[in-house]
Image (cartoon, rainbow, N blue to C red):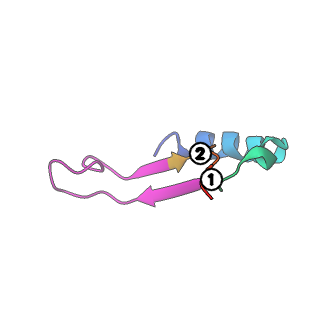
């Protein structure tokens, strides 16, 4: 989480630049708290997940 502020500042700059108008799917940012199970993807501390997709479905 020590890099979350820098990451969000970069995402904010991208959105303000106008490049975000090309997104077909809205960006998703998730914050997940720490979980103790050994195989958890948040074992060792909270995490921030950023999901930026750019896909076009051709199904009717």
The residue that disc 1 covers is 27
Measuring from the top left, give residue 14's x and y in whole percent: 75, 41
Q: Which residues are magenta?
A: 28-49
Q: Is residue 60 left or right of residue 33?
A: right
> Residue at 54% of width from left, 45% of height from top?
4
Q: Is tag 1's residue or tag 2's residue first in the polypeptide sequence?
A: 1
The residue that disc 2 covers is 52
Q: Residues within 10 Å of mark 1 (few under 14, many from 20)?
A: some
Q: Is residue 3 left or right of residue 22?
A: left
Measuring from the top left, give residue 38's x and y in whole percent: 14, 48
Q: Residues within 10 Å of mark 2 (few under 14, many from 20)?
A: few
In this rendering, the count of numbered labels is 2
Type of secondary structure dominating the magenta stretch: loop
Is 59 in the magenta? no
Q: Can you tell which mark lies on residue 4?
A: none
Viewer-nearest residue: 25 or 8:
25
Q: Are marks 1 and 2 in contact (CB under 8 Å)?
A: yes
Is 44 in the magenta? yes
Q: Residue furthest left?
A: 38
Measuring from the top left, give residue 9's x and y in whole percent: 68, 44
> Residue at 68% of width from left, 39% of height from top?
10
Q: Work out which quarter of the rendered image holds the C terminus and state it.
A: bottom right
């Amino acid at each position: 989480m020590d890099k979350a502020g820098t990451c969000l500042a970069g995402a904010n700059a991208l959105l303000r630049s106008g490049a975000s108008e090309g997104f077909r799917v809205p960006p998703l940012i998730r914050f997940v708290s720490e979980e103790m199970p050994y195989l958890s993807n948040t074992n060792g501390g909270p995490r921030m997940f950023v999901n930026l997709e750019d896909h076009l479905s051709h199904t009717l």
